[in-house]
Amino acid sequence: MPEPRNPPHDLGSNQSQDQPPSSAQPKAANTRATVLSDSEVQAGSLDMNIAVDAAQLVAAGSPMRAIARYQARMPEAVYLDARLEGNAYTLPEIRTLLEGEVPDGQRTEDTDQVINLAAAARLMVTMASQGPMMVSRAVSDAFNEVLTTHEVIEPGVVRGTGRAGGGGGWVNVMGARFAVPTPGPDGKSLVRLFDQGLAISQMDAPVPVQAAKWAAWATYHQFYSNGNKRTGRFVMNTILLSHGFDAILIPAKAKTEYEQTLYQLFIDTDPRPNVQFLLSNLPQNNA
């Protein structure tokens, strides 16, 4: 696994501002990000040909049991997602909020984010309960709308395709800045990248690999004005649950390791550490 290039120690905000490929295997050139300065890079192209030992992946189980296990852990799942965003809510406070009472002393922004994460968790259960699912624009848009309500002008809208338009922007990654892909006229460039990612994620591979690849692809290309990591992970877990795999929940103690893989994804244009990290957190008991 390539080592990151001396990353600093904190992960800043991950916020963007301002036709499908043929059945042939989509090609994603291994083009490194363009270095703009010592701390700034511009998007390159991801090589998604990632070797994964399928024998190491757990077999699918019952979707209903996987969904039930997730529901039983929903407060914890919301807490873990909130921790990845730097949210100050504790697990007991999240339990209190989910019971309908707002804890004292919390910022409105943090409270809104936890409410949105809980709403996305419920949406995931609803979608996964409908049967086996694959990544789609409609599913991704729906999650981003729920996750970024109160955060952006047009939640659930791919950059450049809505009434507000939208240009490029930056993602702050452990002290470095990543210039996100520009949407192009009417967002057509981003839509093409979205469709390319759909084709890549649906190539012949085990479902967990397809889902984890999509999460990395969506995180890197920053399709929305905000909430891209969250959106990618919720889409990934919806696919997993609907096929009988448990959701991938990133432990609080693994936050720094996760952020290291984001640094390698954005700054080194290398999706392998992120995909492999996600798969390493796939629960191994799907009975």
Image: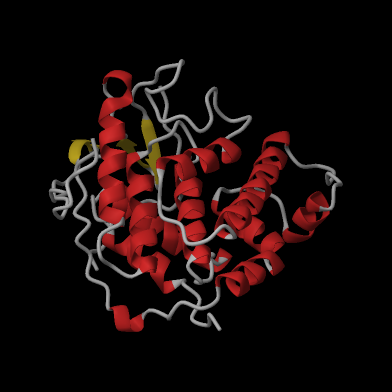
Name which quarter of the figure residue 275 lies in: bottom left
The answer to whether 50 is drawn above or below residue 20 in the figure is below
Q: Residue at x 63, y 48 (%)?
A: 117
Q: Residue at x 28, y 26 (%)?
A: 188
* Residue 8 place in picture, x, y as percent: 38, 51
Name which quarter of the figure residue 260 lies in: bottom left
* Residue 47 place in picture, x, y as percent: 19, 54
Q: Residue at x 41, y 46 (%)?
A: 136
Q: Nearer the viewer, residue 259 or 162?
A: 162
The colouring scheme, among rainbow, by chain, secondary structure or one colour, is: secondary structure
Quadrant housing the N terminus = bottom left
The answer to whether 155 is drawn above or below residue 166 in the figure is below
* Left or right of 84, for residue 48: left
Q: Residue at x 55, y 35 (%)?
A: 145
Q: Is residue 40 visible?
A: no
* Residue 237 place in picture, x, y as percent: 50, 60
* Left or right of 244, for residue 51: left
Quadrant housing the C terminus = bottom right
* Residue 5 place in picture, x, y as percent: 25, 55
Q: Nearer the viewer, residue 267 or 213?
A: 213
Count the numbered circles shown: 0
* Left or right of 234, for residue 273: left
Q: Is residue 174 visible?
A: yes
Name which quarter of the figure residue 146 lies in: top right
Q: Residue furthest front?
A: 131
